[in-house]
Amino acid sequence: MNHPNVDRDYSAQATVTKAEFDAVMARYRSASEAATTGLDGTADLAFDPLSDERLDVWGTSTGQLRPVVLAVHGGYWRMLSRHDTAFMARVQADAGIATVVPDYTLAPAAPLEEIVRQVRAAVAWVYHHGAEHGLDPERIHVVGSSAGGHLAAMTAVAGWQRAAGLPGDVVKGAMTISGLFDLRPLVGSFANAWLTLDLTRAEALSPISLPPGTAPLHVAVAEHEAAGFHRQSKAFHAHWPTSSWSLVPGRNHYDVFLDLADPASALSQALVGLALS
């Protein structure tokens, strides 16, 4: 049974008009196409044989291994793709950073455990095979917005790396933007129509219930955001000992991610600083 208060707290789309939502969705794609046109890289690389999902690499430079920002898209785990998520690639490339954008199988076609596994598999691919494509396996950073913020956090938490054949500090830094870190409230929300979680699985998939990693984490949240996202971002910042925090003024749940396409924005500068630290 859905709880109206929970639905209100986690309905990001209710914070914008339909016209605003549609416009930002279109900007994700058009800005990504503009950012990657003519940019060095390699598209459509298979990174996960279990799912045959693909990723794109942008902003490489011949003869050098660049630090990596792996950008994970949002969409409440059920929409969007890597083609909507490369709008920061040129800004990052100008700073000497490569961008990797992976796809993952969307819910409900895949359970959330599988989605998490796939995003972690993208990290593993960069570590094991990235050098072949100009990526430095020792400088992997992950950023994500909304559901992508949850998935970015799930790559930074401790405890999963050994079984994947990775060092515990494989992710050297992460940024979450208006993410979700405690999935238990979603069990009673509209989102469970496609997540189909119970409380036990929701807790196991919640970064705030897992031991934090050692990497620096920047937790950002848009000013004009649903209340649940604000509460969860503050709680996750408190949970992670090596975290910093920012409130992004004037932005909503959707357009805040596009700040990464603006080299003058505080959020973009924070990501560049994280990747080059």
Image (cartoon, rainbow, N blue to C red):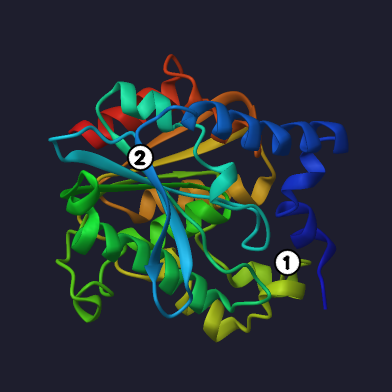
In this view, the mark in front (2 or 1): 2
Three-letter code for the amino acid on which mark 2 is drawn: Gly
Q: Position of residue 227 (x, y in %)?
A: 67, 46
Q: Nearer the viewer, residue 264 or 236?
A: 264
Q: Nearer the viewer, residue 59 or 78?
A: 59
- The residue singled out by tag 2 in the image is 41
- The residue singled out by tag 1 in the image is 191
Q: Element type at marker 1?
A: loop
Residue 240: which disc? none
Look at 67% across and 31% down and name the residue there.
Answer: 27
Question: Real-space Cα distance between discs 2 and 1?
Answer: 35 Å
Is 7 situated left or right of 109 in this image?
right
User: In this rendering, is residue 265 above or below 188?
Assistant: above
Mark 2: few/some/many CA within 10 Å (<14, 14-19, 20+): some
Look at 25% across and 45% down and name the residue there.
Answer: 216
Look at 32% across and 53% down and name the residue there.
Answer: 240
User: In this rendering, is residue 73 above or below 129?
Assistant: above
Mark toward the start of the polypeptide (2 vs 1): 2
Q: Position of residue 74 (x, y in %)?
A: 58, 51
Is 44 situated left or right of 122 in this image?
right
Three-letter code for the amino acid on which mark 1 is drawn: Ala
Is 162 situated left or right of 252 in this image?
left
